[in-house]
Amino acid sequence: MTNKLINKSTINYPDLVQKIKCWGKELGFSGLGITDIDLSAHEQALAKWLANGYHGNMDYMARHGLMRARPAELEPGTVRVISVRLDYLPTNAKCAHVLKSKDHAYISRYALGRDYHKLMRKRLQQLGKKITHYCEDYNFRPFVDSAPILERPLAAKAGLGWVGKHSLLLNKEAGSWFFLGELLIDIPLPVTTTQTTQPDNDCGSCVACLKICPTKAIVEPYVVDARRCISYFTIESPDPIPLALRPLMGNRIYGCDDCQLICPWNKYAKLSQEDDFQARHQLDQVSLLSLFSWQEQDFLHKLQGSPIRRIGFHSWQRNIAVALGNAPYGEEIVTALQEKLSSANALVAEHINWALAQQASKKASSEDNQDANSRLNARLIRAIEKGLPREA
């Protein structure tokens, strides 16, 4: 590549697009597409979603309003968006196994390794600089889940897939286990798809994600009510978890992957090639009691560089306490909860008390079942001794 800067008016745009695609691969992106910034077709749905309060206490969603559908308002001068995909599914993810192990912690697969934000943003910055060396009088701005922008519709327009009924982006060759990032630019590059309407939707009549959602947060196809979403109230919300939803959490202490796990398209998902996205500290197979035993300094040290750290220690303890309440009865669980109660703040203490009540209820139920079985066995023994039929 020549180091000579090229003026916008003399750019060979098709050639530059090919270079951008090659640079994207060199930087490790799993997919890359270019789209215009017209998201007007999504403004009505966005306005309705906000009006219904489906954003919960994420006030920033409402604060920016329709700017999310107008990239040029976010970054003046923007005429194109380079959308990128980066696969994150770690090897040996053990998803179903961990969900069934009620005394173990289920952490969303995206959060098992290092935080993706810095990694992707750095690479997008590098991509932008490569274009800078090719073209003068050019501006760019990278975003990775860090700005009021409708990244999934943009990615769909760029040809990276379609928005599924669970509201996540789906790709025929990669499922949905990937991150998205955007590079806003002021160069009128050719778009990488010729679609003038909504991209083809290959969900068909499938509604598996709606049916599997533990809390029924997908209130209709393509619409998620965050106020019922496990990912929302274990990650985004600092408030007490609603009582009605706590039993539905199971052992999910950070996020939820159920809608992805059930999706038929994820049989084509690609395992991540990034070392940073592999599980750290055995977070893919760790017991709830082990995590609950952490002190705040353990939380901060062991989760350094992890996206989990941003929720804070108290929300972390809150989530684990609920999962312990949902676990099968165990004296060691009750002891651990009681020991934490004296030093817990009000938020955590409320959830510990709930968990203790759940454990007590399970113990009583277990004892009742044992008593009932003992009475039944006694009746059978008496019947046998009298020579009566077992049915008696």
Image (cartoon, rainbow, N blue to C red):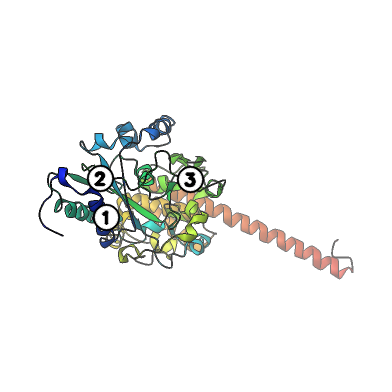
Quadrant position of residue 270: bottom left
Q: Viewer-nearest of labels 2 and 3?
A: 2
73 vs 62, nearest the viewer: 73
Q: What type is the residue that disc 1 sits on?
A: Gln
Label whose residue precedes the other's in the sequence (1 or 2): 1
Q: Quadrant of the C terminus?
A: bottom right
C-alpha span from label 2 to label 3: 26 Å
Element carrying mark 3: loop
Q: Quadrant of the N terminus?
A: bottom left
Q: Position of residue 297 (x, y in %)?
A: 27, 59
C-alpha span from label 3 to label 1: 27 Å
Circle on res. 335: none
108 vs 165, nearest the viewer: 165
Q: What type is the residue that disc 2 sits on?
A: Leu
**Residues under numbered marks 3 and 1 in contact, where contact means CB atoms less than 8 Å apart:** no
Q: Position of residue 153 (x, y in %)?
A: 38, 42
Q: Position of residue 325 (x, y in %)?
A: 49, 53
Q: Residue at x 56, y 48 (%)?
A: 206
> Does residue 360 sit above or below 71 in this rendering?
below
Q: What type is the residue that disc 3 sits on?
A: Asn
Which residue in the protein does label 3 denote? 201
Element carrying mark 2: loop
Circle on res. 18: 1
Q: Residue at x 51, y 45 (%)?
A: 215
